[in-house]
Amino acid sequence: MKEKIEISLHDVLSLEKTPDQRVDGLFELMQVQGQSFYDEAVTQLEHALQAAQLARSSQASMEQITAALLHDIGHFLMNEHEAHDDFLSEDWEHETVGARQLEPFFGRAITDPIFLHVPAKRYLCTVEPDYFNGLSLASQRSFALQGGLMSDKEVARFESQPFHHTAVLLRRWDDGAKVRGLSVPGLEDYRVEVLSCLEH
């Protein structure tokens, strides 16, 4: 893995700040860093907001909605789109970067599904043969870089994870959150959920 972290959440979510100030900083980071394109259809920020809206419309818990909003925070923290497409030919493991950066401030109900949402794609491609064909071109393209189909042992290991069901839900919201021009609520609409999930 080649980590290219440009921004650390340790400053943004400093414990010296009030909870509201910490959420202010997180949302400002997402607003500023989220303007690069996730794929040909939506920006990183639009993708995050669409995923959160899909979670909310599914009557998901506050933790699941927050995980959906923050699932790609690793992309926001890495300078991928200045990398001359290196990140398209080498897996930078944004899910690991994101989960690791969030761990000091959010519980496992948030960080585990984020860490597992890429393995969840591999899992679904393995157990649902038609799943791959429904992925976006960008997601299909990254599939091999991320490990391809799982072995039986990898499937069993994934299914043994406490939050694997949420990770699968998150993966499906992720897949659906790529609609050009879709109007969804903005970041401020998720302040209550994110505040409720801050642990430290």
Image: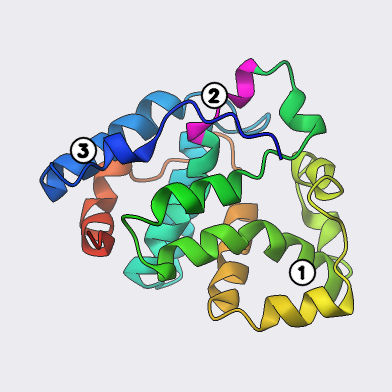
- Tell me if I can see residue 147 in this picture: yes
Q: How far is mark 2 from mark 1, CA to CA?
A: 28 Å
* Amino acid type indicated by mark 3: Asp
Residue 28 highlighted magenta (yes or no): no
Q: Which residues are magenta?
A: 76-82
Q: Residue furthest left?
A: 18
Query: Quarter holding the N terminus?
Result: top right
Q: How far is mark 3 from mark 1, CA to CA?
A: 35 Å
Q: How far is mark 3 from mark 2, CA to CA?
A: 20 Å
The one of 113 and 34 positioned closer to us in this rendering: 113
Q: Is residue 131 left or right of residue 18?
A: right
* Amino acid type indicated by mark 2: Ser
Residue 65 locus on image (x, y percent): 39, 62
| Residue with the mark numbered 1 | 123
Residue 158 locus on image (x, y percent): 70, 75
| Residue with the mark numbered 2 | 36
| Residue with the mark numbered 3 | 24
